[in-house]
Amino acid sequence: MKRLAPSVLVLAALALAVLPACKTMSSDELKSSIEVLDYTSSWVSKYYQPWPPRLILVPQISFRIKNIGKKPLTYVNFNAVFQFKGDPENFGDAFMAAIRSKAVPPGAASDLIVLKGNLGVEGKNLAGIRDNPQWKQAFVRLFAISKGSHPVPLGTYDVSRTIDFKEPEPVEPKK
């Protein structure tokens, strides 16, 4: 019994030392701690098949966040919800557990975070997508979630109509 007591005290001391690091962040604290930087967007290939021709493009966004709060940011997840302007329903989303155990300290910026939508627009080739009436101007609603918080909106951003995909050059037959 005498040997058990010191080890219980050591475990209790360790638990108390770790508890402040495990504190959760409220939704209000999370929202007031994040500033979105370097936002860019484009449409990228989800699927390409030269024959029979088929191409699916999906929206992709990238950004960094700056910690403008007083506490380090850890375990922050991001969710992007994509929607075409004028359409009442979402056409896709993306989720990423982006900031894990490597905290973003106050005043610092995160590494680049890239979220690629799961659904998009289909055509036979780039020209077919550009001519597709379903490929309309889109926007994304960006959310952050951390331990103990509800999803907090970070903003609504337009999705550029820039296409970041090039079709391969046709191969000439050998003579």
Image (cartoon, rainbow, N blue to C red):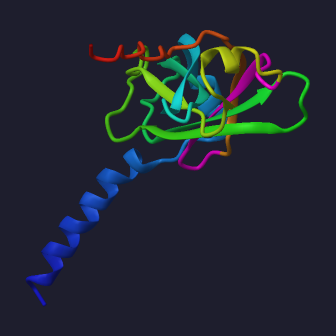
Give the answer, above or below, for where 93 lies relative to 11.
above
Q: In the picture provided, is 59 more to the left or to the right than 5?
A: right
- The image shows residue 38 at horizontal and vertical percentages of 51, 9
Q: Which residues are magenta?
A: 134-149
Q: Quadrant of residue 108?
A: top left
Name the residue: 42% across, 30% down. 72
- The image shows residue 11 at horizontal and vertical percentages of 23, 67
Q: Is residue 135 magenta?
A: yes
Q: Residue furthest left?
A: 3
Q: Residue furthest front?
A: 175
Give the answer, above or below, for where 59 lies relative to 172.
below
Name the residue: 67% across, 31% down. 122
Q: In the picture provided, is 160 more to the left or to the right than 10?
A: right
- The image shows residue 48 at horizontal and vertical percentages of 50, 31
Q: In the picture provided, is 173 more to the left or to the right than 30?
A: left
Give the answer, above or below, for where 101 lies relative to 172.
below
